[in-house]
Image: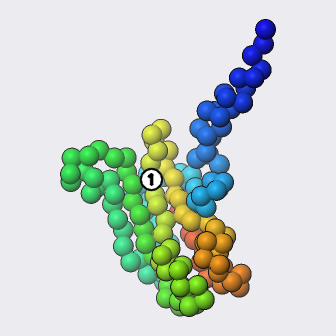
């Protein structure tokens, strides 16, 4: 007797394992882009891109480095916080709560298989989350091109 009724149960465990390979995570608004470089190389490349475009790099938070200071091992994980007040201020004036998500951020991290990813909040997700007017989404949409360029 075939156990076809077990197929949905099997899929419940298999499908989530595909999550990171899909560039857009369904409901959480996080976009993941695979990098062709190490975490440090990707971070350096992203820093160079930001500098060349005149975008301010406010901070680089080395989560794995900080974890090591307290004796916890963590795969390489760094968060870059960057922006441009000329582009970021109009969205904050229109939807003040978006200041929770600005300046923009890109997380560069290594998964358990050694694959490096750039992750960022989808501009469309931020639009919905903060009820941002459509005409201001372009102010935060550069994050996609930045991540894609750093991943190459």
User: Which quadrant, please, contains the C terminus?
Assistant: bottom right
Residues 33 and 16: in front is 16
Counting other residues with Cα less than 10 Å from the Cα at mark 1, is it few (<14), some (14-19), or many (20 or more)?
Answer: many
Q: In which quarter of the image is residue 13?
A: top right
User: Which quadrant, please, contains the N terminus?
Assistant: top right
Q: Quadrant of residue 69?
A: bottom left
The residue positioned 36% from the left and 73% from the top of the image is 59
- The residue lying furthest to the left in this view is 70
- The residue lying furthest to the top in this view is 1
The image position of residue 89, as x and y in percent, is 53, 89
Compared to residue 128, the image places residue 41 above or below, namely: above
Residue 14 appears in the picture as rendered: yes
The image position of residue 62, as x and y in percent, is 33, 60
- The residue singled out by tag 1 in the image is 109
The residue positioned 64% from the left and 81% from the top of the image is 132
Asked whether, in this view, residue 82 is left or right of residue 131, the answer is left
Asked whether, in this view, residue 58 is left or right of residue 13, the answer is left
The image position of residue 67, as x and y in percent, is 27, 52
The residue positioned 20% from the left and 51% from the top of the image is 70
Residues 122 and 35: in front is 122
The residue positioned 35% from the left and 65% from the top of the image is 61
Asked whether, in this view, residue 110 is left or right of residue 19, the answer is left
Compared to residue 50, the image places residue 3 above or below, namely: above
In the structure shown, which secondary structural element does the residue marked by tag 1 occupy?
A: strand
The image position of residue 96, as x and y in percent, is 53, 85
Compared to residue 77, the image places residue 100 above or below, namely: below
């Amino acid at each position: 007797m075939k156990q076809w009724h077990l197929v949905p149960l099997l899929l419940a465990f298999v499908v989530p394992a595909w999550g990171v390979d899909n560039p857009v995570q369904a409901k959480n608004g996080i976009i993941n882009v695979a990098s062709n470089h190490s975490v440090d190389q990707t971070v350096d490349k992203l820093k160079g891109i930001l500098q060349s475009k005149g975008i301010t790099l406010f901070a680089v938070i080395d989560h794995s480095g900080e974890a090591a200071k307290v004796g916890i091992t963590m795969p390489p994980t760094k968060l870059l916080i960057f922006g441009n007040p000329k582009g970021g201020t109009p969205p904050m004036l229109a939807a003040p709560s978006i200041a929770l998500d600005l300046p923009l951020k890109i997380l560069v991290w290594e998964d358990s298989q050694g694959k490096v990813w750039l992750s960022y909040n989808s501009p469309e997700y931020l639009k919905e989350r903060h009820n941002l007017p459509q005409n201001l989404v372009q102010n935060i949409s550069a994050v996609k091109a930045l991540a894609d360029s750093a991943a190459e």
